[in-house]
Amino acid sequence: MQATRRIAILGVVLVCALAVLAEDVTFLTNRRQWEKLPTATLMQMGSIFMNHKVMPDSGMLCYTIVSNRYAPDMTDEDIRHCIHATCNIGRIYSEFYHDFSKAYDNLLNAQEMAEQHHQNDYKAIIQMSLGVLFMKLDPLQPDKHYYKKALDYHKQAFWQAANSKFYDILPVIFINLNYHSMCHQEYSAIDKEIEAYYKFSIPDTALKFSFAQSIGKGVDAMRQGKPEEALEVFKNSTIDDSNPSNTAELKIMRNNCIYYALEHLGRYDEALKTLIHNKDFTQKEAPYYIHECYKLLADFYNKQKNQPLAEKYELLYYRAINNLNTTTLSGSIDNVYFLREIDKMNEEQKALTLKQKHDRQMLWVVSAFLLLALVLLTLLVINRSRIKQKNRVLYENNVALLAADEQRRQQAEQEDKARAETEAAKYGAIRMDEQSTEELWQNIIHVMEYSQEIYDENFSVARLAELIGAKPNYVSQAINQQPDWTFPTLLAHYRIREACRRMNDTARYGNYTVEGLGQSVGFTSRSYFVKLFKKHTGLTPSDYMKQSRTGTPLTVPPKEGETQ
């Protein structure tokens, strides 16, 4: 069954590889073709390329395309794919290109995304990946700084997986915790995790479950001072290679565990053979770890007082470290172009994301502006409608007042004629200085009501006195004794009233301008006319004229002295 599965997986890999080679496509062509693929398909392709350690560049491309699709408002499934892809980009940088800075950066990005979207399962995977990254860096720094960070990340991953009941990855985390603590002889650092691990109901189908049980049992025997028992456990441990991911690393780990047990038992010849075998295996299957083999050989020969061989392997160790640092800083020549293209692709995606963000912001700004303009326009229309209604009411009130005033004037005119005839017959001519103030006031009102001369711009108190036949000072005194009246206010009142009447008479005055109408009733200043008109009617002359032309104007008969 396993053989059939392996053949099927390798067949898919071979088909992918042959397709790429047959088409002889460039990175850019691959990118354009693969960008059209569904996210789930890209994740499957990336898993094949990565887990079987063939064509890591293709795996990187698949995961980069998926990672660049990330958006906070995606579906939960797509968000999980993006987090997983970003995490795997970090792992590829670490395992294949040994670019630990970019590996660390991508893993932290994946961790932020997982925290933001509460993807606790992925948080455990990412923290474990960070722990593995610092395990690789541990031999490069003698002060245990990276060891402590690796231990801390693995502990976080352990408890995160435990709290989320994500038991499938607990065995792998458990293996790393045990192995790392044994290498540094600090077993007590993981007491709580070991105690908790055996209380969980971990399925035996979990990844590396069998090997985790063996290494846990062996390390426990070592900490209890039973290296013989530990040796048997380590030798009899099996590694399930149905999933080839990290199989070589686990075999190196098992060989080192056997070495530590043999060394504790004092079986140095067997311990040395184990180290040599592990060195040869590492050079073939996982050359990145060769510096660890050289370090263990150098330590072994130092303990055996074999200075020449100790110095030889120390030199090889430092050379390996130097090569590793050089690779880490500069990268392999074969990968430089590809990684530059990946960086360029990421920059293009960032630029596109920024542009989309800017476009969204501009859309919001324009939408907000249009909404504000619509609100203002609506308010303007409502306000205009209210003003129009108010102006109409004011106009109608003024028209009603004019009609009532005209009726009162006609009635007063008839009464004045009758009184004048009666008084003339009774008294004859009477001197103005002998008239009472009330009689004088009535004569003033009579002139203001019926004389067209009051609309002459030069009309004055003196002319009013002449028309009445009284002294000007008597006329002024009679007007001033009336509440709220002076000659200017009285004259303005009658002129404005006449202006309203003429505006309503559109048949004769419809073609007059505001200034022309003002001049026709005696105003020489347009602004003064507008000011007085608004004060008396509540409307400007223009508004009043609009209302008179849109409404039903009064039919006003001509006054004395006017022509039809």
Image (spheres, rainbow, N blue to C red):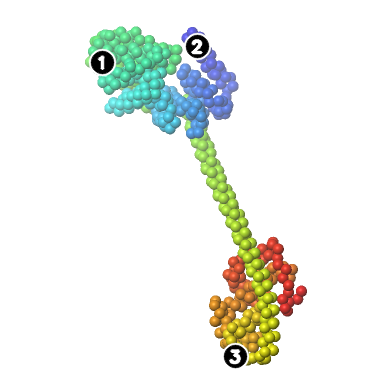
SS state under label 2: helix
Report the residue marked by disc 1.
223
State how far apart marks 1 and 2 are (Cα).
39 Å
State which mark lies toward you, 1 or 3: 3
Q: Is residue 92 left or right of residue 257?
A: right
State which mark lies toward you, 2 or 3: 3
Write the residue at 61% across / 85% down: 440
Q: Position of residue 88 (x, y in %)?
A: 45, 25
Q: Position of residue 36 (x, y in %)?
A: 57, 27
414 in relation to 129, above or below:
below
- Amino acid identity at mark 1: Arg
- Amino acid identity at mark 3: Glu
Write the residue at 49% across / 19% down: 48
State how far apart marks 2 and 3 are (Cα).
136 Å
- Amino acid identity at mark 2: Arg
Write the residue at 68% across / 65% down: 548
Label 1 close to label 3 by CB (< 8 Å): no
Report the residue marked by disc 3.
434
540 in relation to 144, above or below:
below
* Residue nearest the observer in this picture, 555 or 244: 555
* Residue nearest the observer in this picture, 405 or 150: 405
Q: Position of residue 31 (x, y in %)?
A: 55, 28
Image quarter of the C terminus: bottom right
SS state under label 1: helix
398 in relation to 103, above or below:
below
Mark drawn on residue 177? none
Label 2 close to label 3 by CB (< 8 Å): no
